[in-house]
Amino acid sequence: VIPEELLEDGQLRLLDTDTSVVVPVDTHIRFVVTAADVIHDFAVPSLGIKVDAAPGRLNQVSALIQREGVFYGQCSELCGIQHGFMPIKIEAVSLPKFLE
């Protein structure tokens, strides 16, 4: 999470991150998730992705992103006091840009 005082114009409070998952478009992507403490839920609604992340277990979900862009999500399982501060940012780029 980017602290509120460091947000630039256009960045989203509690959704923007200082790092992102960068993936190529038109490529099958597999997300493998787990958790270290309690059950979480990796969710990016605009991509139709939602998968539980449970301690001691590996779960997976596949995606085929067909357009470039930035997609936001967050933990969607009430998991504790920091639940509202678990954003996800996926950046889909062209294959040549991904390979740079």
Image (cartoon, rainbow, N blue to C red):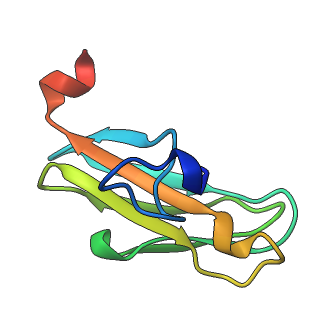
- Residue 34, image x and y in percent? 70, 58
Front-most of residues 48 and 61: 48
Number of disc labels? 0
Spot occupied by residue 13 in the image (x, y as percentages of width and height): 49, 64
The residue at the point 63 percent across, 63 percent down is 86
Q: Residue at the location (50% across, 58% down)?
A: 88
Residue lying furthest bottom: 78
Viewer-nearest residue: 5 or 93: 5
In the image, residue 17 above or below residue 42: above
Q: Residue at x 14, y 35 (%)?
A: 94
Compared across the picture, whether 6 is left or right of 25 comes to: right
Residue 62 visible? yes
Vertical order, 57 against 38 (above or below): above
Q: Residue at x 18, y 24 (%)?
A: 97
In the image, 8 versus 73, the foreground residue is 8
Q: Residue furthest right?
A: 37
- Specify whether 39 is left or right of 24: right
User: Which residue is the extreme one toward the top?
Assistant: 100
**Of all residues shown, which one is farthest toward the front?**
5
Q: Position of residue 25 (x, y in %)?
A: 18, 45
Q: Quadrant of residue 95?
A: top left
Q: Which of the 4 image quadrants contains residue 33? A: bottom right
Task: Tell me if I can see residue 1 in this picture.
Answer: no
Q: Quadrant of the C terminus?
A: top left
Q: Is 49 drawn above or below residue 64 in the view shown?
A: below
Residue 65 is left or right of residue 47, and the answer is left
